Structures are given as C-alpha cells and as structure tokens.
Amino acid sequence: MLEEFLERIENKDCPNCPRMSMCKPVLQITELDIKKPIMFIAEAPGRLGAEISRIPLYGDQTGNNFDELLLKAELNRQQCYITNAVLCVPIDERGNNSTPKESEIRNCSGLLLEQIQIIKPRLIVTLGKSALMALYKIRKHQIQLPIINEKPSVHDWNGLKVLALYHPSPKVMNMFRNKEKQYADYKVIQDWLKEN
C-alpha cells in the first residue's frame, strides 16, 4: 500500500488541477511508514514556505506560528504527521497563494484518505475550512470550527476522532482566532492525548 501510494505521488499527473500542473506535491514521504498519534491536515502548501522547504507547514510565518502552537501544547513535529487538503500549491493569477477550489480538494481527497489509512492516527486535527471540506469529500460530516468563545471538542468521523481547529496563518490569527485562543485550542490536543 505504501509503495503504491508513493509511486503514484512521484508520477503525479493531475489534468483536473490545471493551475497546479507545474507544481511538485509537498509530502513528508520519508515519514509515511511511521505511525503517528496525531495527524494535522492544513489547507495547501505555501509558495514561500512548504514549496521551498518541501516540509508541510514549515518555512514561512504560518509554519512559525504552527511550531509555536505545538510548543505551547508541549507537542513536537516528531509526534505528528502533517499534510494538506491539497498537496500542491494553488496560485492565483498574480502568482500569490490562493485558497484551493472545491474541485481541487475533491481531486486530492483520495490521496488524503490513503494517508489517513497508512498513518492510522489516534487523532486527526483539521486546520481550517479547507481541511474540514477535504474530510467531507471522503465521508460527509457536520463538524464545524468552534465559534468565538467556544472550546473545540473532539468528534467521531469515519471510525476516527477529529478535532477542528483554525488555520495558523497570520491572516486567520489577526482576523478570526488570535494566538491566545489558538494556544488554548492546542491545549485540547494535549489533554485529549493524556486522557485517551
């Protein structure tokens, strides 16, 4: 299963995602055979971070925010498998990062399911709406991001446990869920792991 997945990623041909056709997928391929207790699913690789570093959620301000949140929750990258709703960088007409389209998320949802089946995480943590949509494309759910003062909670989905959190991008932290609230959200991960 692992070898077949890796071969398909290496020989990626995505005619259904034309704006990403020149991108190389960002995936922690060397760690796919390691079982991790936590799987983070973010939106997409960033052109100034993950596309350059080849490491999901790493190398830009979003990656720095994510590392800081992990640290506050007494977690580290070695405990986590990190991926995205789409594996390539969606770019707008000006060459900037763009939110993945629903069709692009759907096109990558089979690859996301395979990653979940390989990693077998105890807890899936979605980061933002695109990640929640990616899970929905695999199996429908009613999971929502927590509202302003609501503490996030763990949900059942497809035989697994899911925690929906906000994305750690600077824009989200400035406009929707500030760092202090996100620190508290990540503490939920730590508490859940201790209890389960």
Image: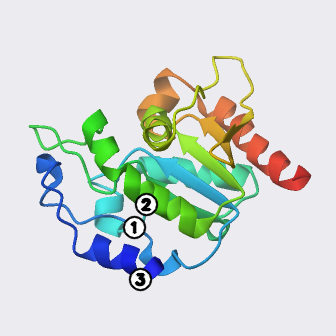
* Three-letter code for the amino acid on which mark 2 is drawn: Pro
- Identify the element where label 1 is drawn: loop
Residue at x 77% of width, y 41% of height: 188
Q: CA distance from mark 2 to mark 3?
A: 21 Å
Q: Which residue is mark 2?
A: 56
Give yes or no for contact between labels 2 and 1 (Cβ–Cβ under 8 Å).
yes
Please identify, in this view, whether the residue under mark 2 or under mark 3 is nearer the observer: 3
With 110 as the anchor, is 103 left or right in this view? left
Residue 98 visible in the picture: no
Residue at x 19% of width, y 61% of height: 23
Q: Which residue is mark 1?
A: 27
Q: CA distance from mark 3 to mark 1?
A: 14 Å
Residue 124 lies, in percent from the top left, at 63, 50
At label 3, counting other C-alpha atoms closer than 10 Å, the crowd grade (few under 14, some 14-19, many 20 or more) is few
- Mark 2 or 1, nearer chain start: 1
The relative height of residue 32 versus residue 50 in the rendered view (above or below) is below
Front-lying residue, 12 or 172: 12
With 167 as the anchor, is 186 left or right in this view? right
Disc marking residue 3:
3
- Identify the element where label 2 is drawn: loop
